[in-house]
Image: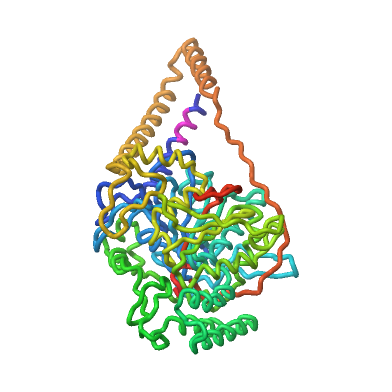
Amino acid sequence: MKKIIISGFIWAYLSHIIAALDSSYYVEKLPDLSKNNNLKLHSGYIVANDRNNNSFFFLLANNRYLIDKQRLVIWLNGGPGCSSMDGAFLENGPFKFSARNMLIENQGGWNEFSNVLFVDQPAGTGFSYSLPENFAEGLPKVKTNYKKMVFCLYMKATEDFITFLDGFFDLFPQFKEDDLYIAGESYAGQYIPYIATAILERNKKENNKHYNLKGLLIGNGWISPLAQYSSYLPFAVENKLVKKGSDLEKKVEEATQSCKTAISAGDKESMSICDRILELIVQPEYRDDKRCINIYDYRLRASSCDVNWPRELPYLVEYLRKPETMNALNIDSDKHILWEECNLRVTERFITHRSPSSFELLPKILDEINVLLYSGDKDIICNYLGTESIISEMEWNGRKGFRKKDGTIAAKYKWTFMDKLVGYYQYDRNLTYVLIKDASHMVPYDKPLETQDMLNRFLGIDPNLILAVRKSNGWNDVGIGSIGDTDGRKEPDIYGQQKSLWSLYYHIGGIILIVLIFGLIFFAWYLYNNHKKLKREYISKYNEVITHNYRFGNDHPRDTSSSAPSYSHKDYNSYNGYVDTSCSKPYIQPQEGGENTDMGYGGPHRGNY
């Protein structure tokens, strides 16, 4: 009897502690956000390195609707050193700016059916903090022994992120067993494969924490610097940014050859040498119209090349520097952090300590999980020709590129979205590639509902369930992934006018737990002080009843069985490309077979940031 009481007390106490920890990260209200929203948010800091107290800032957006099972999507912006609050507030996050000092719920947010975790990393990025001397110096080094490669996976940025992830799941254990996906854009094309490799390798070892990593999504990714630099001239000519046979074309070709030579020689100045290529293409002094081309969206022109894009970026900077916003997001006020989109000190530390290209990691990752690479077709800095070159030169699962067993190339399918052609995709051997029309470096910014649909399909969510949920919440006569209003006006509330009651739930839950704890303490005290006074027959009868009820309550024990995934091992050739700089933006595993006009199931961040 005492054991039952003590166990109940311990359970109640621990539940109260967990709830208290969870609620300490709860975002009760964000300034300037419409009250009519269906959002549950948590944010704050988790220590990523015990030795130097590096701490990562995160923003967690819970899914609006649970459709079949729980999924957690981690989103990382690039740089290196650019804040993932860009993603949260400007791209695929739970809200967006409709005007200055006015936030509305983003109906194209990726948190519709998935829990989405936005993380400022590495340390020193965005709201995350570290002393400059503690900034990560690149990703893990790679030791190559002919075909076999040994990765030092628990170093620097990758090690810090894994430590953060462990801390996150300790704080929010309800997500630990969920299907896990890691997504991002631009320089995240470097981060993500390193992090994924660390998780997959650790999963294979006994007595280690295991996470259910299912897939990766990388948009306009900076994966192979050599492939990307080599793509600039062909891309510029194809899109009429450089005239074929012109003097400018010759200059760009010469700059490209110098870049390739510098990379092959391991020149420490290769980044500045290679940046000359893009400079020749976009700088006004080399163009007839004397207008600078936006490297993230070549449709945009400006009198100078000082990029202030997207147009809502000034709103975001102002908003995240407000004391009331920082207080609402649980920012450490004693750290005196001033949010900036990209921390150039972090960038400099990364590019000074070069790491091997993540291109080397992808083949082995593709042995084990699905990967989606997507590209907006209007981006220059991480353009689609570079991504396609990476795929065609990569060998994975026994073959090179999208070549099938019979020697043919995997079919390229049209992706239609609400009866409109929005892109093309290919799939083979766990890799999906998507080319998205009329999209920039930041694809979710331009195509929020389309990329939401892309995510849902890649995650394997049944479209019939999606449609049923949307119709039940007022989205009538609209198919999957319908295009909404994205011109800055307030969108129709397609999810219904549900008012968030999470703050009330927390308070009520806390009161109930406190009452329960005191009730158990009183009950234990009462039994202890009165058991000697009870007659033996009453004690026997009482114990008999308790024993019967205890056994009855265990007729349906909790299933705690679990099995760690097993993974195949394959050798693969190394690739001599080194990470010198960055670029950033965002698919789906289709069913193989005949003509398919809809997608089957299946980003570095901001350029020089």
Answer left or right for 487 relative to 390: left
Magenta segment main secondary structure: helix
Residue at 58% of width from left, 63% of height from top?
Answer: 194
Answer left or right for 255 relative to 339: right
Answer left or right for 512 relative to 598: left
Front position in the image: 205 or 372: 372
- Quarter containing the C terminus: bottom left
Residue at 27% of width from left, 42% of height from top?
Answer: 497
Taking the view exactly as shown, the residue that stands out farthest to the right is 146
Residue at 62% of width from left, 74% of height from top?
Answer: 577
**x, y (%) of residue 158?**
56, 63
Residue 549 in the image: above or below residue 108:
above
**x, y (%) of residue 592?**
60, 48
Magenta segment boundaries in residue numbering: 5-11
Q: Quadrant of residue 578?
A: bottom right
User: Does the magenta run of residues contain 6?
Assistant: yes
